[in-house]
Amino acid sequence: MSNLDSSLLRSALGVALAAALIAVTAGCAPVRPRPMLDSAAERVGLVGPESDKASTPVSSQAAVERSPWSFDPLLVALLQASRQNSPDLQAARARLDAARAVAGFAARGLAPAGGVSAQLSESQLSVTEADPYDQGSPRPPRRQILQAGLAVRWELDLFGRVGTAQAIAARGVDAEAAALAGAEALLDAEIVRLYALRRERQWARRSLAEALRLSEQRKRDTAERLAGGLAEPPELWQIEAEHAALRAEQAAAEAELQAARAQLLAAVGLSPLLDHPLRERLEASAEPGALPDLQDYALPPDFLDRRPDVRMAEARLRAAMGETVFAERASWPSLTLLGSLASVALPGQFGEAATRSLGIGPALEWNWLSFGRNRLREAAAQAGEQALAAEFEATVLRAVADADGAARAWYAARSGWEEAVDAARLAEQAHLRMQKRVDAGLDARVLGLGAALELRAAERRAVQAWAEALAAYAALKLALGVDTAADDGHA
């Protein structure tokens, strides 16, 4: 390399280092909005101004973390299969992967960018170009030119725009991760609801089949009593009406059972028309299980951190705050270091010192003339931030209201289940007592059959209350932001 090239290179490097030093010392830091859930929890009364979230006592916290279906392998298998097969979850995961790719792209915004180029061209001047004044000048021969170059550019984050863009992209990842968690929670709660409904309808089908057998026998006994003058026609009419109602209830239970099975398989991500091991296991009837003993539950201080919708609203708001700063700094100057090395020569002369060109130095760009476009962009970003701030506050309030309502619904459903179980127990005692009187000949058999039908109806009401309570518990876990599929082996 000649002395001139070395001097030019040293001068250019000195200018570049000076520009980089100016950018480091005078540039603005990127804006990364801080999390806002702590202040939101303080505003809605979850924690006090000076309280420590880790030291706040929470009653029955471990109870709600445990799953009441830990010993139900079929439900656990359905929940696990849904995580793998659900199209909705697959779409949410794809969106999360896309957001991560965008964040990775933004994270490399401070890295230099460069490229190489090469071109071989053959040219020849036209007669008009070679002899514009028609003086008989000969047309020059064709010539080939080889061009090759290397160019590098490095934008210095002079005012923190690149760092702010990185923070915005990171909040996009947080929002999509919260959206995925919310989709999983919603799907889990729906699967638990449909599973409880199917088990209840299975029990109802079996109970109604037995009830129809008893009702048919009671109808025959009443007809015999009517023929013997021991009963009145209205009594038989009433029994026939109740028998018809049982047949209608059986048909409705069968239809609801098949619909619940199809909806459950579709929610898991399986076709209701195809055979599958889980479908075969669903056909087997099972006794209703126990319900969790959860009393006097208080909202945990980190309740808002658990709610996917709150986390997503917070991430969107923080991204909007970054967008506002980004819009404010969009019209500020940008400083870029440019470097290029090229050679333009005939094919046989390529690489010679006389054919090389070198360029390096800073480039300052300032788009200051916008006729108000930059201010309108800032105003739009600020308005969007205000809208998302209002949506965040509304989401927080809805989350607290949902959790409170879900807790009250759970307490009511569990109480209703306990009352229904007590009613079934009393109906069983009444049936046993009536059966003893029938066996002793003190009462007609038709009364014993009526007591047996009342017992079957009370049992069906208890199982229905169990299904409603289990669905209410799943809704409570959903409202509290607890992972429904996370079992720890406790009932």
Image (cartoon, grey):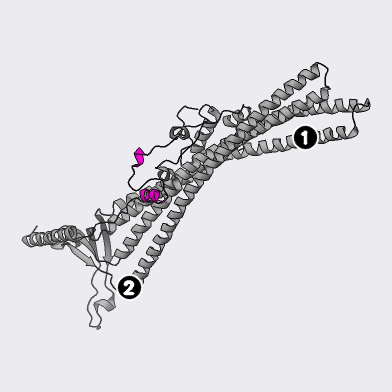
- The question of residue 320 being in magenta is answered with no
Asked whether residue 102 is in view, the answer is no
Query: Residue 390 falls in which quadrant of the image?
Result: bottom left
Query: Residue 180 falls in which quadrant of the image?
Result: top left
Secondary structure beneath label 1: helix
Amino acid type indicated by mark 1: Arg
Query: Residue 217 falls in which quadrant of the image?
Result: top right
Q: CA distance from mark 1 to mark 2?
A: 77 Å
Residue sitting nearer the eye, 274 or 87:
87
Q: Residue at x 30, y 56 (%)?
A: 164
Q: Residue at x 21, y 66 (%)?
A: 364
What x and y, as percent, mark residue 450?
78, 27
Which badge, 1 or 2, comes first in the chain's sequence?
1
Residue sitting nearer the eye, 142 or 387:
387
Residue sitting nearer the eye, 125 or 113:
113
Q: How many other residues sit within 10 Å of disc 1, few (<14), some (14-19) or many (≥20)?
A: some
Q: Are marks 1 and 2 in contact (CB under 8 Å)?
A: no
Amino acid type indicated by mark 2: Ser
Choose mark 1 or mark 2, whichever is in front.
1
* Labelled disc at residue 247: 1
Residue sitting nearer the eye, 62 or 310:
62
Secondary structure beneath label 2: loop
